[in-house]
Structures are given as structure tokens and as C-alpha cells.
Image (tube, helix red, strand yellow):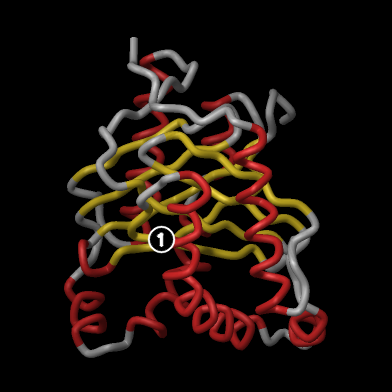
Amino acid sequence: MKQNMETYNDTKLYAQISSYMGRLLREKFGKGPTSIFVTINKPYITIYLRDFLAPIERVLLEKGEWKRIEETRDVLMQELFPEIRKELKVIADLDVEDLHYDWNLDIHSGIVFGSIKHSDTVTGNSGLSKMDEEQFYTEINKASERGQKVPEKTEVFWLNDRTIVTKRTGILVEIEKQLIKNDFVEELKLTKRPMEKKMVDQKKLEDIIGKSIIDTFVDWNFEKDIGYFVFVTTPKKDL
């Protein structure tokens, strides 16, 4: 039986983080998310955003200009990361590193997530049988292989009954490494985001975990050759 991760169930703490993130995004984007769901379960924190689309972004999205939206958000989020780290330390005494983000513009959702320093690597309790867990790992590796190659190492973190983080180490192929070396990181991210999501066989994953996947997010730490999938699911079986 797996050891449980260090869990934060402080409703007040979650509310403080949600309030802070709502204000910050509203100030920078002109409109904040309608709802924010925070999960802290070491070694990760996730901040899930619903109904997050600024008025000007809505116009651009209607014109099919999703790339311009993502490029602008990339610039803004990189500028906000130091402030977010600082505030999470103040609010929750968390040393967060390697912050990430991704968006699902089709349904106006998004996520900000990061790893917490000095945390033991414990995967949490999936509630699945050993066979189902192995099948889940297999499907994650297959998704990586379709887009790049089988990861050298795959880890799955079951943060709670609705949030799953997968960490894939050693996934970059040589052409991607050269693009990164030549400073084409932004172009690579914009290309890989939709591609990697399409590589995931969502129906198979849903069959394994016994519930629907609402959102799939991706991001990378290219310097460390790490890729992430974050899945947000329904709280119970609803296939």
C-alpha cells in the first residue's frame, strides 16, 4: 500500500490562494477566472481555472487566432512566476519551483502547477488495482511514443480523486533538442501543446480510472528533459 503524500486540507488556505490568483489574473488579463480550484499534495500544487477568457481574447478566438492568445499569455505568465512563487511562500509557506501552465481555450479553462521543493517523491493512492495502475502507465508511455519516444522514466502522482499529474523524464528527440539549443522554445511549445494532447487515448484512460477526463494539460521543462500531463477528472464515475 502506497504512503500518502503530505496533504493540505485547510479550506481557509485554499481560499486565500484562490483569492490571490483571481485578483492577480484579473489585474493582468482584465478578467479573472469564474472559479479556481487549488490542490496541494506534496510534491505538487495545482491551481485549476474555469471560465478564464478575457474579452479581447474572446474576439481573437472567434477569429481562430488561438496562437496569438497563447503567445501573449506565455509572455505574461513568465513575468508573473516570480510574484506567484513569492506569494505562495507568504500564504502557505511553500517553496515552489519549476512552475508550469497550460490552457484549454475551447472550454476557457487553464491550470498553473508546480513542484514543491524539499518534498519526498511519493505518488499517493490511486484507488486502482495494481493491474489498472500498470495499464495507466502503459497508456502514458504509448502517448509519449506516438509523439516522441518512450520516456526513460514515467511517474504518476494521484493528488486527489480529481487531479492526476504524470511526469515523463527523457522524452525529447534530437531535433527537439536542437530547436531548444537554437532558442526556438516558444515555437516548439506552441507546436507540441496540441500535438501531445492528441496523442493521448482519453477513452482508454477513462476506462482504466472509471471516470471521465474533463481536461488534459501539458507542459515541459526542456532544460531537464521532462514533460508533464495533468488530468482533471470528474469526482466519480460518469462515462
Q: Position of residue 38 (x, y in %)?
A: 60, 44
Q: Nearer the viewer, residue 183 or 178?
A: 183
* Left or right for 203, reference 159: right
Which corner quadrant holds the N terminus? top left
User: Percent position (x, y) of residue 50?
Assistant: 73, 55
Judge by depth and name the residue closer to the eye, 9 or 104. 9
In which quadrant will I find the C terminus?
A: top right
Q: Determine which residue is flagged by label 1.
A: 99
Give the total of numbered labels: 1
Q: Residue furthest top?
A: 1
> Does residue 46 appear left or right of residue 145 in this picture?
right
* Residue nearer the viewer, 48 or 94: 94
> Percent x, y for residue 135?
39, 28
Could you tell me which residue is drawn at 40 percent across and 50 percent down?
Answer: 143
Residue at point 34%, 81% (across, down): 185
Question: In the rendered image, which quarter is residue 81 located in?
Answer: bottom left
- The answer to which image quadrant residue 93 occupies is top left
Query: Is 15 rendered above or below residue 21?
Result: above
Q: Amino acid at mark 1?
A: Leu
In percent of the image, x 34 and y 60: which residue is there?
98
Q: Residue furthest front?
A: 90
Up/down of 64 relative to 151, above or below: below
**Residue at image x 64%, y 48%?**
16
Please rate how many residues cluster around mark 1, counting C-alpha atoms within 10 Å: few if below 14, some from 14 to 19, many from 20: many
Label 1's element? Answer: strand
Q: Is residue 172 above or below residue 89?
A: below
Measured as percent of width and height from the top left, residue 195 is found at 47, 67
